[in-house]
Image (tube, rainbow, N blue to C red):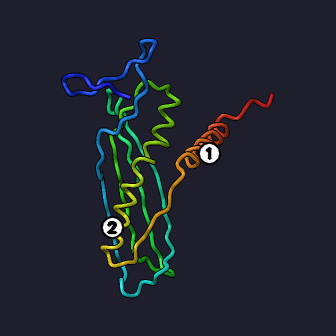
Amino acid sequence: MTNQSGNGGAQPAQAGNGSIARQFILHRLYLKDLSFEVPGDVLQASSNPDIKLNLKTTHRDLGNEQTEVVLHVSAHAKQGEGTLFLIEVDQAGVFQISGCSPEESRMLVGIACPATLFPYAREVISSLVSRGGFPPLVLQHIDFAALFAQASAQQQQQEQGANPADAG
């Protein structure tokens, strides 16, 4: 979606009507925060613990059509009432999103950005669990489009509940 200029920089591609074409570019990828706790005895761990996975995304506008998106992933492994391990990973990226409507940008930030970041967070979690002495933990694919739709529906319900229609 970009044209390479002679100076080596990426320049926005021009659409046929002279407008800027849509761009979705990952400029930076980084691990923003990481925590791995093993409060119990690794040797007492079973091969099939109960894993609770939580996902959340946050974002902030950096200007120049760049947005930092952070995918927060936590995996809590329990055996009975005890915690085997707890991992919290904040995988971040700086994305350039341009030439899109506000709704398209919102969808890219809510779906495409976390979907881009998730494989990196999954690899960090898998590696840490193995290095912590536990059997490998393979996180399955996440449907961020479905999660986004669900969160949007919940937000819409909350907004409707906060602004009830006049009954009169």
Q: Closer to the observer: label 1 or label 2?
A: 2
Rendered image quadrant of residue 160 = top right
Q: Disc 2 on helix, strand or loop?
A: helix
Q: What residue type is labelled 1?
A: Gln
Closest to the observer, 166 or 4: 4
Q: Disc 1 on helix, strand or loop?
A: helix
Q: With 81 as the anchor, is 167 left or right in this view?
A: right
How far separated are the C-alphas under marks 1 and 2?
34 Å
Residue under pointer 2: 127
Rendered image quadrant of residue 128 = bottom left
Q: Position of residue 159 (x, y in %)?
A: 62, 37
Q: Which residue is drawn at 46% across and 84% down?
A: 46
Q: With 33 as the anchor, is 59 left or right in this view?
A: right
Q: Where is residue 79 in the image (x, y as percent from the top left)?
A: 48, 80
Query: Furthest-bottom residue in view?
Result: 44
Residue under pointer 1: 154
Relative to 17, residue 113 above or below = below
Closest to the observer, 151 or 14: 14
Q: Residue at x 34, y 61 (%)?
A: 124
Q: What residue type is labelled 2?
A: Ser
